[in-house]
Amino acid sequence: MRVAIILVAVLLLPIALPSAVAWRADGWLSQDIVGGERLRLGDEFGCHGMPDRDVRDGLDVVSDCKDYLTSNIHASKWGSQPLSFQVSRGAVSIEIHDTLFDAGFRTLGDGNLSGELDGLTPIMRSGGSLEKNVASTAAIEEGIAENGYANLYWEAQIEDLNVRRDKDVLAWIEDQPYWFTTWGEWYSAIHLADEIDSTSTSITLRGSAARDGGWAVPGTTYLSVQGANITDVARVDGEPLLEIEEDTRHLEIGLRQLNDRAVIFTIPEGVEVRIEFDTEPTVLQKAAAPFNNMTPFMAVGHHTTDLFEWSEPFQNSPIRFTWLIEPQADIEPTWILPAIAVIVVLTVPTAVWWTMKKDREQYDEEE
């Protein structure tokens, strides 16, 4: 009887601890062989929340997910703190917006922001999915035409279903002249160099800081002139400014002269570049631009609970991912085992007593 009571107590333990952790960490995040490799490649890690909890039901989801992420991995090679957060579709309240902004987030997936909420940059789904039989080159081109960028969805497992990538569409993407970037890198890289000096035949620009709250990512400036030709582009400090190849699709520092009258260059904050002309231009224009004058292409891993499983199909791909992570849901406590234990405790002694009674009666009869 005593053994049975102990058995019941052990089986009831998970039920008696309602504050027990309801999730498990993804060990691949902190492993250099997976998390470290993706980080060095240029992938980004953002937040998708916590298992079975929505930010609309409790704002502590924001801090809990951020703490989970930062305790396991840096958000990017550009910065340790995460910039990207994914919410379920629907309107985003002022409280949610301000909580995310105050926590350092700057890009928001799926949520609808009203006009007065301008602190976060919304990033819309654009181009569909990477899933087999769902991915579409036409959808990608339509998304780019509508939004100016591609932002494709990927989830390796939906409930018990393992999802496969579309290899044909993936091969097509990898052959396109896209800038393969991530949410936070794209947000942080769009800033124009500042003009600090000019003459009739030259202009000097200095690399500016990233947008508010962004990482220290070099910004790209596009400069064009009319009525003159560009004769030289060089750093003021004499350091080399490397030529960016036309097919370079990952952000790097350097310049590419598009023709005699247009140049595009990517420089970090504080670096000064002088552009010289053969005569005074009649028109000079400059603007912030995407890296290498390419269309930004972003792929996003939603509900990333197992980084190895989510990233394994893309080990040799030039595409860079924004992994929106969340912990793995733990197995919920169940009343089935305790119920069985209670039944055993109640029935076994009775069965033993009944068996012994029958044996005794049989023994007495034989006597």
Image (spheres, rainbow, N blue to C red):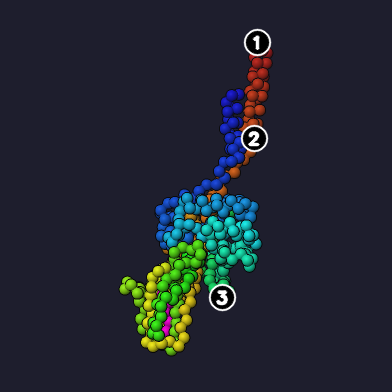
The residue identified by callout 2 is: 339
> Is residue 294 in sight in this rendering?
no
Camera-side mark, 3 or 2: 3
Residue at (47% x, 60% y) in the render: 44
Residue at (44% x, 84% y) in the render: 225
Prevailing secondary structure class for the magenta stretch in the rendered image: strand
Which quadrant is home to the C terminus? Answer: top right
Q: Amino acid at mark 3?
A: Ala
Where disc 1 sits, the SS reads loop
Q: Specify which label sits upstream in the sequence, 1 or 2.
A: 2
116 is within the stretch colored magenta:
no
Q: Amino acid at mark 1?
A: Glu
The residue identified by callout 3 is: 145
Q: Nearer the viewer, residue 306 or 259?
A: 259
263 is within the stretch colored magenta:
yes
* Circle 3 crowding by C-alpha within 10 Å: few under 14, some 14–19, many from 20: few
Camera-side mark, 1 or 3: 3
* Circle 2 crowding by C-alpha within 10 Å: few under 14, some 14–19, many from 20: some
Q: Give the x, y percent position of residue 212.
A: 51, 64
Residue 201 found in image quarter? bottom left
* Circle 1 crowding by C-alpha within 10 Å: few under 14, some 14–19, many from 20: few
Camera-side mark, 1 or 2: 2
Which quadrant is home to the N terminus? Answer: top right
The residue identified by callout 1 is: 367
What's the magenta region?
261-266
How far apart marks 1 and 2 lie (CA) works out to 42 Å
Left or right of residue 238, residue 121 in this image: right
Above or below 366: residue 92:
below
